[in-house]
Image (cartoon, rainbow, N blue to C red):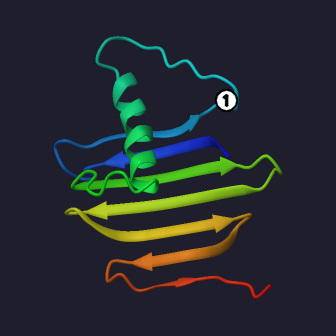
């Protein structure tokens, strides 16, 4: 599974607001270039932090942030993962595979998981 696109928004509607949209990732190699203090390292840290959360290596991310990441599998399926955090609490989490909603969770921790009997 490889990252295809990333949208990220940190501290929405606050003085520390920071974001990037439609960061396109090449399946083989990526090079991020730009002027000093333009967000290259920050973009890398956004990807690294989310990977740590998905792998269960890290619990707390940022006090307020929104991720929308699209992956592509070797078989060509698309996977979209959306995670919104406000005041260090998850307010929205969704996982879609080929536009089918598979996991959904709200700010109360309630949600739905799709399953299929084998």
The single residue placed furthest to the right in the displayed view is 75
Q: Position of residue 44 (x, y in %)?
A: 42, 31
Please indicate whether residue 102 sits to the left or right of residue 47 in the image.
right
Residue 23 higher or lower than 111, as above or below? above
Q: Residue at x 74, y 63 (%)?
A: 98
Q: Is residue 47 left or right of residue 57?
A: right
Compare residues 86 and 50 and report the one nearer the observer.
Answer: 50
Q: Residue furthest left?
A: 15
Is residue 10 rendered to the left or right of residue 100?
left
In percent of width and height, residue 109 lies at 36, 81
Which residue is drawn at the image coordinates 74% and 84% (left, top)?
116
Q: Position of residue 70 (x, y in %)?
A: 61, 50
Decide: few, some or many residues near mark 1? Use Cα within 10 Å; few <14, some 14-19, many ≥20.
few
- The image shows residue 21 at horizontal and vertical percentages of 49, 41
Above or below residue 63? Residue 97 is below
Picture quarter with the C terminus: bottom right
Q: Which residue is mark 1?
A: 26
Look at 31% across and 12% down and name the residue there: 36
- Out of 108 and 73, give the one closest to the viewer: 73
């Amino acid at each position: 599974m490889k990252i295809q696109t990333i949208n990220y928004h940190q501290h929405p509607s606050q003085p520390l607001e920071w974001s990037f949209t439609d960061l396109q990732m090449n399946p083989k190699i990526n090079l991020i270039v730009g002027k000093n203090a333009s967000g290259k390292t920050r973009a890398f840290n956004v990807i690294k932090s989310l990977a740590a959360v998905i792998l269960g290596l890290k619990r707390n991310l940022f006090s307020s942030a929104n991720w929308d990441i699209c992956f592509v599998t070797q078989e060509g399926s698309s996977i979209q993962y959306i995670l919104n955090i406000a005041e260090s609490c998850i307010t929205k989490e969704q996982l879609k595979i080929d536009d089918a909603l598979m996991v959904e969770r709200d700010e109360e921790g309630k949600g739905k998981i799709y399953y299929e009997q084998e």
